[in-house]
């Protein structure tokens, strides 16, 4: 192996050597602990350490790295205290994730390391977001994301590289091509000659290098970093290496041909660099042994401290899910209805869509770093024209047209959040959020619980049927997310809430899904306070109180209930607008039961597994003695949403409301 030391002083080379020793010797120790059952699972990076160490050293300490499961060398090179790492792997309260995450699935803001989720590819777009944050702030910093050869086959790889290229982001995408994805050899993973060949396809420079040569990795990544900053562009680097041990310790390496293994063993990054240092006279056998001994001693000492691991505190589990809300501003003087209070009267009357527009525009004015992202939202103003004019007022940096890639944009929003920049992502239609589902339910939703990182991201979802738009432009998909801890879900039904709840969502450090019903945009009007004031999340509001039955609804269904009640003045019908689905206002639910003893849950989404199922279950469990009838649900049919107007009308819950109310009244 040839080493090019450039003009590095001897101490620097010895530092590289020492940095290589840490992951290797820690891992050797951990393999013993694994056999003793003291840690549960181990993904080996033996043979690949030069990549983690070389890349981490080539970056500045405050540049974000998105490592994966074989990058122990990133964690050690960034100087994370070993005892805390050991505590992490033992699942201790004092580890980085307080016992909530395993192996390498954790991050640390202090060390600018973003914790991975198991799905691998989603890390790449998060790097886009971090690089975007630096770009917007005019900082000379790159972000670096790791990816395996297997991970390059994921759609997230394509989306993230494309976004970085289109947005000219200084991201280093580093592929560790170690020959196998679990047991799948590269011949079954891709057909290009080399993975670096993919770079030019995205309009990106790319190179393939020897990933087992620490100086090659270090020199190359340093050079690439300079390139990215100078040219404001991303770069793809493929590091050739090999996985010497099994995918994880239980799975072995039987499927690897012996000669291939031997050839790569001879290319061991640590042994080869050590040999080079010995030959260059920078190291002798004795010093090498002393170095190893000193690292081993440090590992043993830190390990003995970590043996006093503390069991996690189970009492704070539910509080750990959400980041605490600190930024809510006081309510405006002109009385924007807080929580479940009555709607403001006297404020100017606006349409539902204007409530959203105002909430967005004023938030952009009040929060100088707030970024909007979405397809066609800039010049075109979005397909519903909600962002019209915002480009002119706030500029292209903050009002960003995106390529057609929901997953990467939601991932990028999380990356902005790493740097404390809040963002609002517009789904063109709520239906398309399925293409970004993984980032929402696994990355955004879980990140605070997993390692304490807030995700200040609002996703706007134009939702709902009633406009003859067929199965893929009409769905109510709030229930897909309702089941996921860590998300908040708001669903306004009137213009004041459209504004106030949107502002609250933007000020919230947690991921908030903001459902906006398309059919309400231009059909519903009402007073909207002029001030920039958040409504309170998690508070329902009584539209009217009744004595015979209580209808619990949200979104367009609130208007169905109102119009039904208007048409039946002889019936005393209370209507509770939930406004926020997560968190739910349980007090108001209980009040709904107490007032009438008869509850109908009305929603536009299909019946089975909808929000009504949960509300009904909760009421029956907690308010049984207050009930005079079973909780009933009126929901849409359990079919996809049909296009034909008569079919759509038949699909929607509204067509069965009369029957549901009559049955409940008669009970
Ligand atoms: C989306 C997804 N599918 C499947 C898996 C299971 N899995 C975990 S690691 C892995 C192989 C990854 O291969 P590669 O990207 O080459 O990384 P390596 O493990 O070789 O470092 C697979 C299939 C996963 N984690 N995520």
Image (cartoon, rainbow, N blue to C red):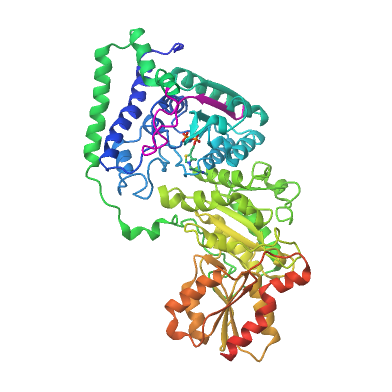
Expressed as whole percent of the image width and height from the top left, the position of residue 235 reads 59, 28
Taking the image as shown, residue 185 lies to the left or right of residue 425, namely left
Task: Please tell me which residue lies in front, 85 or 340.
Answer: 85
Residue 165: name its quadrant.
Answer: top right
Task: Please check the rendered image and state whether residue 242 is part of the magenta-colored stretch, yes or no.
Answer: yes
Task: Please tell me which residue lies in front, 598 or 333.
Answer: 598
Task: Please check the rendered image and state whether residue 551 is part of the magenta-colored stretch, yes or no.
Answer: no
Residue 56: name its quadrant.
Answer: top left
Q: Is 646 above or below relative to 462?
A: below
Expressed as whole percent of the image width and height from the top left, the position of residue 42 reads 36, 38
Residue at point 46%, 42% (across, down): 116
Expressed as whole percent of the image width and height from the top left, the position of residue 527 reads 67, 70
Res. 140 in view: no
Task: Please tell me which residue lies in front, 270 or 87.
Answer: 270
Residue at point 55%, 23% (across, down): 224
Residue 316: name its quadrant.
Answer: bottom left
Q: Is 30 above or below relative to 606?
A: above
Expressed as whole percent of the image width and height from the top left, the position of residue 65 reads 47, 35
Res. 511 in view: yes
User: How many numbered tags mark residues here?
Assistant: 0
Quarter of the image with the N terminus in it: top left
Task: Please tell me which residue lies in front, 153 or 16.
Answer: 153
Q: Is 374 above or below relative to 234?
A: below
Residue at point 27%, 43% (across, down): 37
| Magenta portion: prevailing SS class | loop
Magenta span covers which residues?
A: 229-258
Q: Is 256 above or below relative to 521?
A: above
Taking the image as shown, residue 519 lies to the left or right of residue 407, namely right
Quarter of the image with the C terminus in it: bottom right
């Amino acid at each position: 192996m040839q080493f090019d030391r450039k003009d590095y002083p001897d101490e620097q080379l010895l530092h590289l050597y020492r940095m290589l020793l840490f992951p290797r010797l820690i891992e050797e120790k951990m393999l013993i602990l694994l056999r003793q059952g003291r840690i549960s699972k181990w993904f080996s990076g033996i043979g690949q350490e030069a990549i983690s160490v070389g890349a981490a050293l080539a970056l500045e300490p405050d540049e974000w790295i998105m490592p994966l499961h074989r990058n122990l060398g990133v964690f050690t090179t960034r100087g994370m205290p070993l005892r805390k790492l050991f505590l992490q792997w033992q699942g201790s309260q004092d580890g980085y994730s307080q016992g909530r995450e395993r192996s390498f699935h954790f991050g640390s803001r202090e060390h600018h390391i973003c914790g991975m989720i198991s799905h691998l590819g989603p890390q790449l777009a998060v790097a886009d977001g971090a690089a975007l944050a630096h770009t917007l702030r005019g900082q000379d910093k790159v972000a670096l994301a790791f990816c395996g050869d297997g991970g390059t086959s994921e759609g997230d790889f394509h989306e993230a590289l494309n976004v970085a290229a289109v947005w000219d982001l200084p991201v280093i995408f580093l592929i560790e091509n170690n020959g196998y994805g679990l047991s799948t050899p590269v011949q079954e993973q891709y057909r290009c000659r080399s993975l670096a060949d993919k770079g030019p396809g995205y309009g990106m420079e790319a190179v393939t290098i020897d990933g087992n040569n620490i100086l090659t990795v270090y020199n190359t990544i340093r050079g690439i970093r300079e390139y990215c900053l100078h040219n404001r562009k991303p770069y793809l680097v493929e590091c050739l290496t090999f996985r010497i041990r099994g995918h994880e310790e239980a799975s072995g390496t039987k499927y690897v041909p012996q000669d291939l293994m031997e050839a790569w063993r001879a290319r061991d990054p640590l042994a080869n660099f050590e040999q080079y240092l010995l030959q260059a006279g920078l190291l002798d056998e004795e010093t090498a042994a002393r170095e190893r001994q000193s690292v081993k001693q440090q590992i043993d000492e830190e390990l003995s401290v970590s043996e006093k691991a503390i069991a996690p505190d189970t009492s704070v589990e539910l509080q750990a899910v959400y980041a605490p809300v600190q930024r809510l501003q006081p309510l405006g003087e002109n009385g924007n209805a807080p929580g479940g209070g009555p709607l403001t009267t006297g404020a100017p009357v606006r349409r539902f869509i204007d409530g959203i527009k105002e909430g967005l525009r004023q938030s952009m004015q009040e929060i100088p770093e707030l970024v909007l992202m979405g397809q066609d939202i800039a010049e075109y103003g979005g397909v519903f024209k909600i962002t019209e004019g915002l480009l002119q007022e706030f500029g292209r940096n903050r009002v960003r047209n995106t390529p057609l890639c929901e997953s990467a944009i939601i991932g990028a929003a999380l990356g902005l959040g790493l740097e404390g920049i809040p963002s609002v992502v517009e789904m063109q239609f709520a239906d398309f959020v399925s293409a970004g589902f993984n980032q929402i339910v696994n990355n955004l939703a879980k990140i605070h619980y997993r390692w304490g990182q807030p995700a200040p991201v609002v996703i706007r979802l134009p939702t709902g049927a009633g406009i003859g738009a067929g199965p893929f432009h009409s769905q109510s998909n709030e229930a897909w997310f309702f089941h996921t801890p860590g998300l908040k879900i708001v669903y306004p039904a009137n213009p004041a809430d459209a504004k106030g709840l949107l502002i609250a969502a933007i000020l919230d450090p947690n991921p908030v899904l903001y459902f906006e019903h398309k059919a309400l945009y231009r059909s519903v009007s009402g007073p909207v306070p002029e001030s920039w004031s958040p409504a309170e999340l998690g508070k329902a509001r009584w539209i009217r109180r009744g004595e015979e039955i209580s209808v619990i609804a949200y979104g367009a269904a609130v208007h169905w209930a109102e119009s039904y009640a208007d048409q039946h003045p002889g019936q005393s019908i209370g209507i509770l607008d939930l406004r926020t689905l997560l968190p739910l206002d349980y007090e108001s639910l209980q009040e709904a039961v107490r007032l009438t003893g008869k509850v109908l849950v009305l929603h536009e989404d299909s019946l089975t597994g909808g929000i009504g199922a949960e509300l009904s279950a909760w009421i029956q469990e907690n308010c049984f003695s207050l009930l005079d009838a079973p909780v009933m649900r009126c929901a849409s049919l359990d079919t996809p949403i049909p296009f034909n107007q008569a079919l759509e009308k038949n699909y929607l819950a509204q067509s069965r409301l009369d029957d549901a109310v009559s049955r409940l009244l008669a009970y």
